[in-house]
Amino acid sequence: MSFYDTMTRLEQLPYEALWSRYTAEDVKRALRAERVDEEGLMALLSPAAEPYLEEMAQKAHRLTRTHFGHVMQLFTPMYLADYCVNHCTYCSFSSIYDFPRKKLTLEQVAREAETIAATGLRHILILTGESRNDSPAGYVRDCVNVLRRYFASVSIEVNPLSTAEYAELREAGVDGLTLYQEVYHQETYRALHVKGPKRVYRNRLDAPERGCQAGFRSVNIGALLGMYEWRQEALATALHARYLQDKYPECEIGLSTPRFRPYLGEFNPASDVTDRALVQIILAYRLFLPRSGISLSTREPAALRDHLVQLGITKMSAGVSTEVGGHSLEGGTPQFEISDNRSVNEMAEMLRSQGLQPIFKDWDILSEPLGLR
């Protein structure tokens, strides 16, 4: 059974009535469970769990320290190109916006890499707009050949590719894939993705599995929270992660929790994801998926990020720019506004002040079998 079958089943459930049926006893049962099942996950995401966030936080903290220790991996995104053929109603890179588009040359890629590497970071996530003509898999591969001279780990966040294309990039040195479904609810997905190949829901939904099949060491998924009712989106994301984790145990499956942030257009999200709701999502993820990494981006303000580092987060971005060449060039258009502008050093000091060890490198592409450091 594919995960698409699971999504079809989920969308047939009467959600408004469903969430209200969970009780305090259901939440307590989930908190006692050695392995939380789908019913337990729904209880932890339900309104009935709101009075139990402190108990959830204590267990999430214990599970995180058990499986990940007192460490926090740091990384930063690097935007290679912002050409895009899709019309997505919530993104600054949408094809309907008229602004000077950019694509880094290999020389500029090297300059950007040098600037980032000077901060000490050795994990990088490279991104492009979604245009097969302007930033095809071959261009990404050529950039990776440059970036491997500077970084121990190179992950990609690009348009969905075939299994063969993912395998080609893995052979070039890419070890991780990040790909957000954006929104799991199919009707909302079609409404938000007006034109372009991204409009094909199933192609995007199946792409993380193609990444697992291609042999990536890690695959990271998530929903852009706010696009649809957040409880349903968090449920779908967590079930998607467990589906991949159970089917591909050799691959590290991670989750991200991005909330919608202001951008070039005027789109307003449909669901209000409060700070308290974000906390509940992160805690439910950790209790449902004790071994999965959870990432927190600079979309969130510094004070909130500082608070959440003890509640299940294992990976954070630092020193971020969402512009093409934003670390070494000027004058680009950001994909979205960030809220935490702290440098890598400032983030590292914050983590140390909370008793955590910032990790700049825990993987080496050239090492076999796993190259953990």
Image: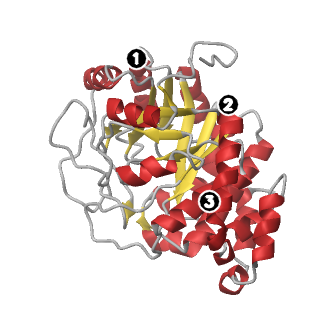
Query: Tag on residue 202?
Result: 3
Left/right of residue 52 with respect to residue 5 in the rendered view:
left
Q: Nearer the viewer, mark 3 or mark 1?
A: 1
Q: Amino acid at mark 2?
A: Gly
Q: Nearer the viewer, residue 6 or 52?
A: 52
Look at the picture and state if 313 lies above or below 217. below
> Gap between marks 3 and 1, in whole Å?
35 Å
Per the rendering, the mark at residue 341 is: none
* Mark earlier in primary sequence (2, 1): 1
Residue 139 at what x, y percent from top left?
40, 30
Element on which disc 3 rests = helix
Disc 2 designates what residue? 215
At horizontal 25% and vertical 32% (from top left) the residue drawn is 327
Residue that lies at the very extreme toward the bottom in this rendered image: 17
Q: Which image quarter is the C terminus in?
A: top right
What percent of the width, then of the height, locates residue 138? 45, 29
* Mark sitting earlier along the chain (3/1): 1
Element assignment for label 1: loop
Which sits in the foreground, 20 or 2? 20
Residue 345, position in %: x, y?
Answer: 34, 29
Quarter the N terminus occupies: bottom right
Q: How far, Cα to Cα, is label 2 from label 3?
A: 21 Å
Between 33 and 211, the residue placed more toward the observer is 33
Amino acid on which disc 1 is placed: Tyr
Q: Up-down: is 173 above or below 25?
A: above
Q: Residue at x 58, y 27 (%)?
A: 170
Label annotation for residue 150:
1
